[in-house]
Image: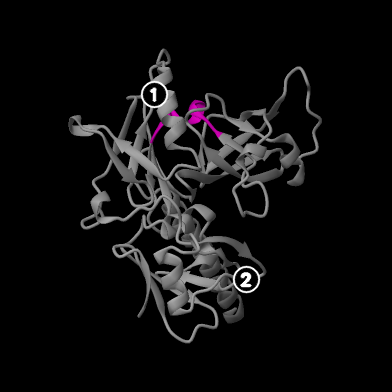
Amino acid sequence: MRLRRTIERGVLATLFAVFTVALAGSAHAQTLDGDAFRTPAKRYGSAYTVKLTLKRGLTEYVTTMWLKPDQAESTLDYDQMQELGWSEPLDPKKPYLNFDDASIVGVPIEKTSFKNQKSEWAYVPDFPRSCCYGIIGRDILSQYSEKFVPKNPTHVEWRKVDLDPDTTWSRTFIQSLKDLFSFQSEWGVDHSKGRKKRIDLSETSYTLDLAQKQIRFEPMPPGREEKGLFPRSRPIFTFYFVPPIRKVKIETIDAIDSPVAKSAKKVGVKPGMLVTHLNGQSVFTMDQFEVQAYLKGKRSALLNLTIDKMSHPVAFDFKKGVFVGR
């Protein structure tokens, strides 16, 4: 009898633990009030990607998707979906992939049918493969107000909104979305308060509300206004990523007779050297656009570099335009 009660208590404890974990997972998805949720995201340039879970029968597919509000219809790449095990033939007359359920971090969305479209355009420089299986377009994004947060942890906050079914968007507005959400973009434009101001999208959160046809930028953090940055037209050195542990390999250093190149030689920075950290952040976690932003002075006035096999620390002073020893 005592053994039976012990077993029963163990079973109840296990069930309680599972229930607690389930609640914690649900709470993680529903971090905001009401019809709102938050999802982890990755950022390339100013473009964001999120995970979309799709179910068909007993099979579940977890896909990475670009968020592109300048595209009207959400799409999936049939060829890439085959990599995940999708085996149903595609009807040329009805080129759609149909699912039973679709969700973002466990929150169901109404869209369950996606048009087949190639996504080769989404290749991110120095990334091992095409980043995404498809695109989340306006047919989904217009149902929410989305806040894009570039600070770690990078995420998107979604809040359900009501959209007038007769809502239309001008070509000018769509073009502004295309410019803003391009993975090649580094800057946004704030038209509020009757003035036009460029802002650094890697530092600034902003909200897109398609229902209201609005883009709202948050104020820049103190001390990070554009005037405090020192953007250059070209990076202090060109580079490429090297495996197996992702590092930045210096290819060439500015113009050969420039103050940048001369100061680099003076402190011992040479082509072929491997950079592991920029301002203390591992380059393993960065994409090409983030590294470029650092090397162009769009993140800080002083860039500290951690370089393999260098016996002394080195930095680049964007105010002076030269490398300096620390």
**Residue 141 shown in magenta:** yes
Tag 1 or tag 2, which sits nearer the N-term?
Answer: 1
Residue 281 image position (x, y, % from top left):
44, 68
**Taking 215 as reference, is 22 left or right?**
right
Q: What is the number of the mark on residue 94? A: none
In the rendered view, tell whether residue 138 sits above or below residue 93. below
Is residue 153 in view from this perspective? no
Q: What is the number of the mark on residue 245? A: 2
Q: Please name the residue that numbered disc 1 is placed on.
A: 173
Image quadrant holding the C terminus, namely: bottom left
Classed neighbour count for the residue bearing mark 2: other residues with Cα under 10 Å, few (<14), some (14–19), many (≥20): few
Q: Residue at x 44, y 70 (%)?
A: 262
**Which of 287 and 212 lies nearest the eye of the viewer?**
287
Q: Quadrant of residue 76?
A: top right
Residue 117 image position (x, y, % from top left):
67, 30
> Of the residues shown, which amino acid type is indicated by label 2?
Ile
Magenta residues, as a range?
A: 136-145
In the rendered view, tell whether residue 169 sits above or below residue 311. above
Q: Residue at x 44, y 58 (%)?
A: 24
**Taking 77 as reference, is 310 left or right?**
left
Classed neighbour count for the residue bearing mark 1: other residues with Cα under 10 Å, few (<14), some (14–19), many (≥20): some
In the rendered view, tell whether residue 29 sits above or below residue 121. below
**Total count of labels:** 2
> Of the residues shown, which amino acid type is indicated by label 1?
Phe
Is residue 319 in view from this perspective? yes
Image quadrant holding the N terminus, namely: bottom right
In the rendered view, tell whether residue 272 sits above or below residue 124. below
Residue 255 image position (x, y, % from top left):
49, 60
Q: Quadrant of residue 7?
A: bottom right
Contact between marks 2 and 1 (CB within 8 A): the answer is no
